[in-house]
Image (cartoon, rainbow, N blue to C red):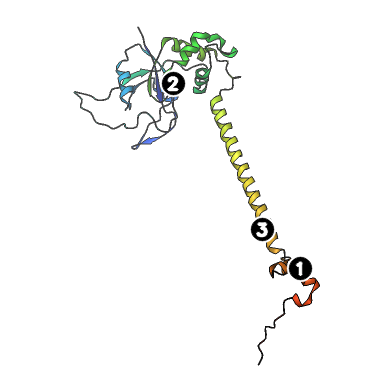
Amino acid sequence: MSKFWLLKAEPNSRIVKGKDVKFSVDDFEKIQTTAWEGVRNYEARNLMKEMKVGDMAVFYHSNCKVPAFDDRTQKTDKENPKWYMVDLTFVERAKNFIPLALLRYIGDIPSTTPPPELEYVGEDGISAIKGMDLVTRGRLSVQRVSEEAWNTIQLLAKRGGWEGLNLKSPQKKATKAMVENKRKGKTTQRKDVDEQHVTEEVASDAAEKSPPRPPGRKRKREAANIDPEAVEGDSEARPLRRSGRFRK
């Protein structure tokens, strides 16, 4: 019984140790059969060892900055090899390109009820996509694909029809909105603090520029500890004015 797989490759040029690791579906279609070399991940290697003649695979374009395989020159013993590869033969292109965003969109659907645009895949198809390693794990360069998920992918590739869907993740949109609101809140708070600081500075400057009020007669009398009535009624009770000059 055939098994189903998903294998990733990078469609854009990237030089690793002097060698371009680019391999696109165009390259695959041109050469038809190729050895799937360069896998340097133990889990991916073990999955490739499970592959048999007649198994089917989905070819996936990966644009990740840090690929799962990053060493194409490791040496191993021919009698006891450490790494393995398989030969793959090109079969056909998907009639409708299936973006990763679509699979993630399906994975984020709260229930197994498909939206009207994808009603043709049914609840079983939605469940199968939700369980794919590509949706739940993502980074592994060689992955198992269940027969249900394989059939759903074939159906999606054949029929399409999801162009009207908003494939942006609602969680990412919500996170972005929270970040924006948080930034705005911080900006507003900082602005309020700055305005308060400016107001305090203006009030302080105004207080410094305003000339001090001269003390009234009452303040002078209280400072001298003199009875106000005695000062007003008896001239002798008034304090003598002493000259600051020295007599010669």
Residue that numbered label 2 is attached to: 136
Q: Is residue 99 above or below residue 112?
A: below
Seen at 24% across and 31% down, the residue is 75
Q: Residue furthest right?
A: 233
State how far apart marks 1 and 2 are (Cα).
93 Å
Q: Are marks 3 and 2 in contact (CB under 8 Å)?
A: no
- 195 displayed left or right of 54: right
Residue that numbered label 3 is attached to: 204
Seen at 28% across and 22% down, the residue is 84
- 81 displayed left or right of 156: left
Q: Are marks 1 and 2 in contact (CB under 8 Å)?
A: no
The x, y position of residue 248, in whole percent, is 65, 93
Which of these two is toward me, 180 or 151? Answer: 180
Which structural element holds mark 3?
A: helix
The x, y position of residue 217, in whole percent, is 76, 68
Label whose residue precedes the other's in the sequence (3 or 2): 2
Which structural element holds mark 1?
A: helix
